[in-house]
Amino acid sequence: MLRTLHRMLPAPEARALAALTAWLSTAAVLQGIVLGLAGITIAALLNAGDDDPWPRLVALAGSSVAFVIVQWAAQLIAFRTGSQTARALHTRLGEHVARLPLGWFTPIRQTELIDTATTGVPQLMSYPAILLRPAITAILTPIAAATTLALLDWRYSLAVLATTVVAWYASTLSQRLARTVDTRRHRTSIEAANRILEYATRQPLIRTDQRPEDVDALDHALRDAARESRRSTVTVLPGLLLFSLTLNALFAALITLGILWVTDATLTVPAFVGLLVTTARLTAIAAAGAELAAGLRLQHGALTRIGSVLDARPLPVLKLPPVETSSGNVLANVEGISFRYGDDPVIEDVSFTLPRRGLTALVGPSGSGKTTITRLLARFWDPTNGRIALDATDLRSIEPDRLYAQIAMVLQDDYLVDATIRENIRAANPSATDADMCRAVRSAGLDSTLAELPNGLDTPTGPGGARLSGGQRQRVSIARALLKAAPLTIMDEATSALDPENTRLVSAAARELARTGSVLVIAHNLDTIVNADQVLVLDRGRIIQRGTHAELARRDGHYRTLLDAQWAR
Ligand SMILES: Nc1ncnc2c1ncn2[C@@H]1O[C@H](COP(=O)(O)OP(=O)(O)OP(=O)(O)O)[C@@H](O)[C@H]1O
């Protein structure tokens, strides 16, 4: 665990952890020497007359003082290292997550990430601060004590070393037993957390639709979590019992050995008493170490989860030759792409181009793959076959920052950061002038909304934009896209039109952006489609028709059927 944590930390914090380990190891060895010397001194005092106890008493006092000083310094360093470790892990997690492909952020991974950042990292902080000391002490102190005891009786010293190895093995075994249940318990508790989040955020839907299956799913998840929690307690107990029994059996074995050696006169009674005092103290140290095992296991679990986030690889940026395009007017070239989520093919052999300027409407029934195509264009994932090029460059060879600078997105229910409306919009283009900002706000239809807000553009949006209505959030998102004026804008029109005014605004913004850039709209609004330069009709992951609205509307086929069913009402 120490090695894993050491590997995860940046160099300065890893060095601090190594230094702390050295301090704690020195303290543990000194403690062992103190305990060994205590046994030897007791033997010498009981053996009055035969031995001069003073040299031993001086050595004991000297090593005790050294131990207290080193232990005190180590503890101070431990608290500092604990908070440095937590800070470094938070930073590493944050920097790493920012480089992961957007497709990595599934709901369950998001819940895991919240748990890791808010619970896992703070848990790990107490590893260097509190638990590393007893963990090191439980191993090094008995070894140092046993070695010191060799001055009194080398056979007993070897016996203590052997029992230390057996006790260490028993402790590892009991922890391994518990770790498997810990993993299951964590999985079910994350599933429950996810369900609770879903239950809380979908309350309106659950209440109005009276969906008992949502409540059932939550009930199941909570029951599973409670069951695993009970099971983990029950499974951990035999391990703890095994360790406690082993420890007591080892102590009894050492006493028996001592008695045997006293009986055959190869060990004196005072020496035996001295050895027993030291051994009893070592047993107490080992038992205290075992009591902290549960904490260590929790930290091991947290470390494993942080490791699995850090192991997730960002999509590689490859060195690829430029892509030839048929004309300089092409911005995006999608060539024979296929994609699957797991084993399910979702997109199959799709090809199309997006012009540098113009509006492309993507239409098709629900589940036909429209959203997936737009996500592949923003490189949430790489297609399993084929390639996508932006400005004659394969997406896989564009640095993420450069790629995101070229794309703007307006989604159905956009997430706003907890800042003012102005800050949310300006984030799209920090160098935009106030005049550009006003234009974007006006075109997005936000001016009427702002007039009703007491602080206008400086109104806080709340976490995720919760203080604005869905329609207002979408208008902020449109203003952001207008201000960014990226070469490619991807828009997702609301399926269940929030209000006709917003639908008209998305359509108008799409047309405006299409005058200077390329716009790809997942279109549900006939107005958008009629104005599109090309319409791509998608069905079960394939493009089955393409052309303008007028061309497609004249032909029999899927588009006409869609048109009749959806828009001609
Ligand atoms: N993250 C995911 N994991 C697994 N399957 C997914 C995932 N996202 C979408 N799918 C599946 O991929 C298929 C295409 O989904 P997609 O969201 O691209 O369709 P869509 O045409 O945008 O649908 P809608 O109009 O309803 O939004 C669907 O069958 C969907 O169930």
Image (cartoon, helix red, strand yellow):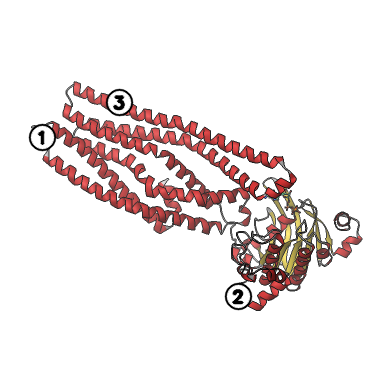
* Mark 3 sits near ligand 1, with its Cβ under 8 Å away: no
The span from disc 3 to disc 1 (Cα, nearest Å) is: 29 Å
Q: Position of residue 216 (x, y in %)?
A: 67, 38
Q: Which residue is mark 2?
A: 431
Q: Secondary structure at mark 3?
A: helix
* Residue shown at 22% from the left, 38% from the top: 36
Visible in this render: residue 306?
no
The amino acid type found where label 3 is placed reads Ala
* Residue shown at 36% from the left, 42% from the top: 135
Q: Secondary structure at mark 2?
A: loop
* Mark 1 sits near ligand 1, with its Cβ under 8 Å away: no
Q: Which residue is mark 1?
A: 51
Q: Earlier in the sequence, mark 2 or mark 3?
A: 3
- Kindly identify which numbered label has been placed on residue 252: 3
* Residue shown at 63% from the left, 44% from the top: 195
The amino acid type found where label 2 is placed reads Ser
Q: Earlier in the sequence, mark 3 or mark 1?
A: 1
Q: Nearer the viewer, residue 49 or 394?
A: 49
